[in-house]
Amino acid sequence: MAIIAPFRGLRYNPATVLSLEDVFTPPYDVIDAAGEAALRAKHPYNMIRLDLGKKTSGAEEDAGRYAASRDLLAQWEREQVLIRDPRPALYLYHVEYSHPSGRRLVRKGLVALVGLAEFGEGIVKPHEKTFRGVVTDRLRLLETCETQFSQIFSLYPDPEGTVMHGLESVCAGPPLYRAVDGDNGRHSLWAVDDPAVLAEVAQWFADKTLYIADGHHRYTTALQLREQAKAARGPLPANSPFNFTMMYLCAMEDPGLSVLPTHRLARLPGGAPLDDLLARLAPAFAIAEIGGGSREVLLSETLARMAENAQGRVVFGLYHPNADRAFLLTLKNGAMEAAFGDRHPPALRQLDVVVLSDLLLERCLGLTHDRCADENLVDYFSDPDEALDQAVKEAARPSGREPLLFLMNPTAVGQVRQVADADLVMPHKSTYFYPKILTGLVMYKIVADEAIE
């Protein structure tokens, strides 16, 4: 059973921080060095000063970074920059945003504490692998600051919208916060502390499974912190704060839930004439050329044709910048089985990212997973125009590597659920849930001697 609990959120004090939009940040794992510098310069209370900090190469300097975050957090609490809500609450979180298609959507979710469960228990299910170095960094920050700064993004099944209806029924007033992000997404947060509603939501989740959408490393970090607490304190009571982690929960059926594709720019060492390249792909893929227009028109038309042909089929777009030609690649029936037999379970066999990685890149083009990583042969882009621009630039600079832009359809939420239910994992960069949730809207302060209600 999934255990859902309210908590006393740690939040920015709007009476002290007048420009709230200048202090919230995207999740730490999408912020590069330039983005970090820009956020630090944006406001002296920006969340980046607590949640990330620039990594260094020295262990002693890194230890100082975590301690500096802890000390700054304590200072901000003393100065009432950050305040803790007096009563436990669930937090209703809406974000209104523009989808790349131009549609304006609203995604509705809630922020709550969730009882930690090992993946093998089947209560909280992953769909991605985690990497030790990332977990180590997040663990050191969490154990030093004893505060979870950002939420794990998870999904739950609720086709009737029961949870949102219950929470929205008691949120008629203005939100605690309204903030606009850099993409003109409008984020709103309400606190719900009505005991009857909290009890109803907790009871509703009791027989549900949760699926991690974004934040696998943060969840693994919370599991490790719990083990450390057990080692230091002995057996933990069920209501210990170490037994919980903070999550943003969104219904799988929410009409505002969007998953964007992540396009791949591959580099073929030594290159290959276009006709030879297509000949290598032809045994596994039906190939149709997209004709006419500028490269931007080709890109737009290819993406449109991919969307039209995606129902029940694996379809890619291929743009060859040196030839300035675009193609639709459709997986032939039985091609995966012919190449791999029963190596791939059914939940992975028709997954676009698996077909691209294992069949197209590795089998057809000879680019193994290890070689792509070791030689930096693949880059990932959520923005197709940015990917196109980079492909064209690389084609203009001869390097002995032929740039090939592979355009992707988004992974469906149902596929995420199928993979997780089968205890499998997807390849790197399989999903991009959009928009990202803001870091700093509400935080979970772990107070060891408190009890979670």
Image (cartoon, rainbow, N blue to C red):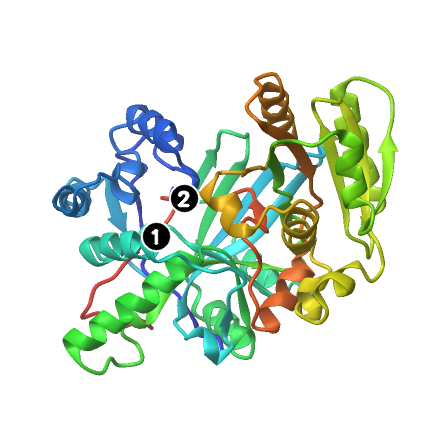
N-terminal-most mark, 1 or 2: 2
| Label 1, residues with CA under 10 Å away: few <14, some 14-19, many ≥20 | few
Rendered residue at 52%/53% (across/down):
171
**Residue 408 spot, x, y in % from top left:** 69, 43
**Residue 356 spot, x, y in % from top left:** 67, 49
Q: Is residue 295 visible?
A: yes
Left or right of 305? Residue 161 is left
Rendered residue at 67%/52% (across/down):
363
Q: CA–CA distance between discs 1 and 2?
A: 9 Å
The residue to which callout 1 is attached is 134
- The amino acid on which the numbered mark 1 sits, given as a three-letter code, is Val
Name the one closer to the observer, 201 or 294. 294
Quarter of the image where one finds residue 40: top left
**The C terminus, quarter of image:** bottom left
Q: Is residue 88 visible?
A: no
Labelled disc at residue 233: none
Rendered residue at 26%/36% (across/down):
54
Secondary structure beneath label 2: helix
Q: Measured along the vertical axis of the image, is residue 288 above or below residue 110?
A: above
**Residue 372 spot, x, y in % from top left:** 53, 44
Rendered residue at 83%/38% (across/down):
305
Left or right of 340? Residue 109 is left
The residue to which callout 2 is attached is 29
Secondary structure beneath label 1: helix
Left or right of 200? Residue 359 is right
- The amino acid on which the numbered mark 2 sits, given as a three-letter code, is Asp
Q: Tell me how many marks there are.
A: 2
Name the one closer to the observer, 355 or 37. 355
Q: Measured along the vertical axis of the image, is residue 65 above or below residue 418?
A: above
| Label 2, residues with CA under 10 Å away: few <14, some 14-19, many ≥20 | few
